Amino acid sequence: MAEIFIDNVRYEFEGKPLVLQFMLDNGLDHPFFCYHPSLSIPANCRQCYVEAGTPVFNRETNSYELDESGERVIRFFPKLMTACSLEASDGMVIKTHRTSELVKRAHKDTLEFILVNHPLDCPICDQAGECPLQIQTYKYGPEGSRFEHKKVHKPKRIKLGPRVILDAERCINCTRCVRFTDEISKSHQLTIISRGDKNYPATAPGMEFDDAYSLNTVDICPVGALTSADFRFKARVWEMNQTPGVDVTNGKGCNIDVWTRDNLVLRITPRYNAKVNDHWMPDFGREDYRRMNENRISRPEVNLDGDKIKSSWNNAELTFTEAIEDVNPSEILVIGSAFSSLEDNYAISAYFNRLGVNDVYFTPHIEAGSGDGFLISDDHYPNTNGCRALGFNEVSAAELKSKITDKSVKAIISLEDDLIGRGVINAGDLKGKFFAYFGSNNNETSKAADLVVPITCSVETISSYINVDGILQRTVPAKETIYTDRKLNLEMSLGRLDRYGTKFDNWVSDSNKVDCIPTWEFLERISRNQNSSLGFNESGDVFEAISSNIESLLGIDYNKIDELQGVQLEISSNKTEV
Amino acid sequence: MSTTYTFSKEDLAEIEKIKAKYPDKKSPVMPVLWLAQDKFGHVNDDVQKLVAETLDLPPAHVFGVATFYTQYYKKEMGKFVIDVCTSFSCQACGAYDILHYIEDQLGIKAGETTADGKFSIQSVECLGACGYAPMLQITNGVYCNHLTKEKVDVILDKLKKDEMPAFERIPFPQHTTAKS
Ligand code: SF4
Ligand code: FES
Ligand code: FES
């Protein structure tokens, strides 16, 4: 196998890796700015310098030339090389800052140059704490600056587009943002204008940076030049918890990080998954944090003579039980939801199957042509394939409406899906029937319900989804409900404030927790009231039941989903065209 | 006030010839911008847009190229554009004195145009004539070298009479065998 020597350590490689990526893959820290694994390589920041050489091969003897001490003679490139654009070759020798004074000096000097016109405003800069320039300056930069002149001033607070704001002085002209719009989102909306120390990125005159993926440039900007209009100045990165999740705003299921502080989700950023979304996600998926925080259903609600009033859980359980016992199983209509997780859907179907209701219906929310073939799918819901896998009856909106309005139906149980809001039915269709709605957010449909059961949303409990391509993924709770505690739940992440703050510190707040429980927990309580049990004590039990009952999910558990970063399932191609 | 800029049939034929010279779409940007500047006297936002449309390129790309070069005029300029080099060699030989002298003579600052539309002044980066510093260039054409205030007076007088100063030929100092 081909070999390469980095700082006198031998590594083996296959193919033609780039030296910088190879070092990073092998856990060797190395400074760089402009390189990004999913973009083209312009090698313009010059921060990733290494010394590189290749062994001298003697064609006559067909062997490497050796010096007196029997070591291979290495011919070094006359100048330092940029590791990001350098392809590894057999026998190559690389010296980094660990073994070469020259490289160490080069890293320092390049940084000194980059910093010549860079404002020293880290204390008020949003990027501080997650800024490659800041981190690398600490690690590799000069102690001070020898630049005693006035810095070049450039425009600040430019609204490049509705969601992205530019501080041109902070820009180091790495061109990552420009390459993103050229190569990934293909909107070609950005360019670097002007020249020399006056450079900065801009849109063409009169044009807006309104790319549907524009916020990805904020993520990849290695400095604080591009910031999110929405998130800027909201929180320091080290004050937040970062928890892996899955985007539920459409069928693609982009992998995300959910950033919370005081149990409010403050921002959503994409998380790398080669199978699903690479490093990217659409802008509207990031807006979803509002749904997680705002307009939540907290505490059950019952309808008393046309008025919604908050009720105790006990009362909600009783209301539910009575209503169900009042009618025959054949008079109950159970509606699953392609918006909800496998766990929620399965729990509902398992409970009602026991009562003798065998069919669960759902109607997908697919709008042909609304997707873009990249990360925005035609399917507006994250779990259509999940409902299919559970064997639910997939019906059109009209069919569902006629089921709901059917005279024989006396009680309707519906899992989070705004059927009224999206025009499947109208409130009048529910007249004279008992309607229970399990949901996280207030909407038209919850308003029309006789009983509203507040359930956890995708960031409050483990939720699994099967995306449009048949990839099974799951979330981890990021936000506490009033019944969960991140210090006790080992799956939840702890930020600095959680770890070091106490309930009595004024920077820790207990508000923002919603009074809700997972669907399975509510139904388990109901079952226990009826002296039976679904056997659910945690989400894992529900998933175990799913994987042992549903053939296509056989043998899969949460660990496997995590390990494989999403499990690819066989999905039937007979999707309904809507 | 907005003018609509269009290319004539002849221009478009010319542009087709330019395009034929290059293997890819992006390359003709510079000569086509140049052609547009010859025609309209400048390549302001609207002209850049016209170029982008004509070449079927993202407007941002054309904007990037146009702003990179001081030789492309991004707004309407005076009849004579005086580009005074203020890069290192010229600066060391008194370029700023010359620039300020011209500014005083014309009553405008670098980056501005006289009210009669006759002169614009720009302070530009190295024009590759460091050997004859300080120097200036007139409307992307004639170089005037080894500038002194007296020489500037002569140049401005000529320009006021719409006469273009002649190109100066400055022979390179030849290699000699002199040793000392
Ligand atoms: S704004 Fe950021 S990403 Fe864009 S060129 Fe500047 S430093 Fe790079
Ligand atoms: S990362 Fe190699 S030159 Fe920028
Ligand atoms: S510095 Fe003025 S021409 Fe080079």
Image: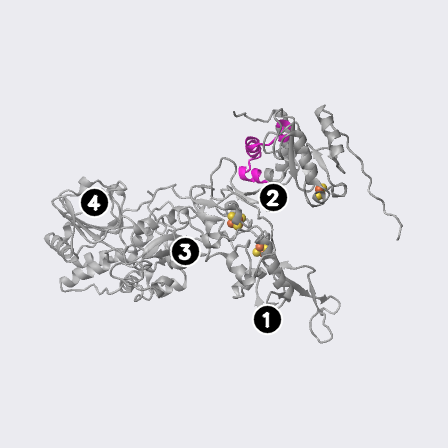
Relative to A359, residue A533 above or below: below
- Outermost residue on the left side: it is A326
Work out whether mark 3 precedes mark 1 in sequence or the reverse, and give the earlier one. Answer: 1
- Do the dots labelled 3 and 2 sit on one chain? yes
Residue assigned mark 3 = A236
Residue assigned mark 1 = A9
Under mark 1, the amino acid is Val
Under mark 2, the amino acid is Arg
Q: Tags 1 and 2 in contact by the CB under 8 Å rule?
A: no
Work out whether mark 4 precedes mark 3 in sequence or the reverse, and give the earlier one. Answer: 3
Work out whether mark 1 precedes mark 2 in sequence or the reverse, and give the earlier one. Answer: 1
How far apart are the two marked residues, 1 and 2, measured between alpha carbons?
42 Å
* Disc nearest the viewer among 2 and 4: 2
Magenta span has B61?
yes
Q: Secondary structure under badge 1?
A: strand
Q: Quadrant of the C terminus of chain A?
A: top left
